[in-house]
Amino acid sequence: MNNENIERMIELLQEMLKWIKFAGAREVRTVLMNILDTEQKRLIYHLSDGERGSVEISKAANVSARTVRRHWASWARLGIVEALGVRGGVRYKKSFELEDFGFTVPQIQTNTPTGTSGFVERISYVRGEMNDVEKNQ
């Protein structure tokens, strides 16, 4: 196979991938809408980036780490997260960005040192990377 044929095959594969993504977008949105039916679930899903563990996500979402792991297991069976082996266990990474499907990412509630409700962090993302953090009281 010469370089010209390989380049043509790559072009065709890219075109096919574009149409497959387009064709599946509606189904993905429907699945996400049905499965991530609470702000809490959307926040857990959004924070599931493969870097954060269940304990860290549970604190941000105000649920138990067991609840996070239970959601991860369920979502993995549906294919909306993928398992990543890490030292000490498994973490999960979301397969889709919520913003790409028109979902609003819930705000993370944090507690003040006295344990009362305090700052709300608003995190805006650009292409999946943290862009700006502003704290409001």
Image (spheres, helix red, strand yellow):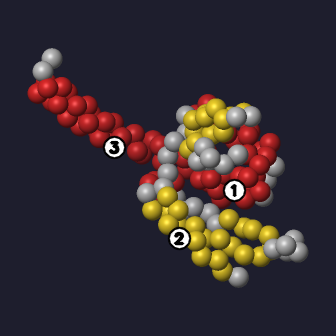
Name the residue beneath numbered marker 3: 22
Kind of element beneath mark 2 = strand
Ranked by sequence position, the earlier of labels 1 and 3 is 3
Ranked by sequence position, the earlier of labels 2 and 1 is 1
Residue sitting farthest toward the front? 87
Please give left or right for residue 34 compared with residue 117 in the image: left
Which amino acid does the dot numbered 1 rest on? Answer: Gln
Q: Residue at x 64, y 56 (%)?
A: 43
Mark 3: give few (<14), some (14-19) or many (20+) Cα within 10 Å. Answer: few
Kind of element beneath mark 1 = helix
The mark total stands at 3
Asked if residue 126 is positioned above or below residue 72 in the image, the reply reads below
* Nearer to us: label 2 or label 1: 2
State the mark number for residue 40.
Answer: 1
Mark 1: give few (<14), some (14-19) or many (20+) Cα within 10 Å. Answer: some
Q: Quadrant of residue 109?
A: bottom right
Measured Cα–Cα span from mark 2 to mark 1: 22 Å
Asked whether residue 136 is in view, the answer is yes
Name the residue beneath numbered marker 2: 132
Between residue 120 and residue 37, name the one nearer to us.
120
Residue sitting farthest toward the top? 1
Ranked by sequence position, the earlier of labels 2 and 3 is 3
Please give left or right for residue 64 compared with residue 77 in the image: right
Q: Are marks 2 and 1 in contact (CB under 8 Å)?
A: no
Q: Are marks 1 and 3 in contact (CB under 8 Å)?
A: no
Which amino acid does the dot numbered 2 rest on? Answer: Asp
Q: Residue at x 23, y 37 (%)?
A: 15
Residue sitting farthest toward the right? 114
Q: Quadrant of residue 12?
A: top left
Where residue 14 appears, x then y in whole percent?
Answer: 26, 36
Measured Cα–Cα span from mark 2 to mark 3: 30 Å
* Nearer to us: label 2 or label 3: 2
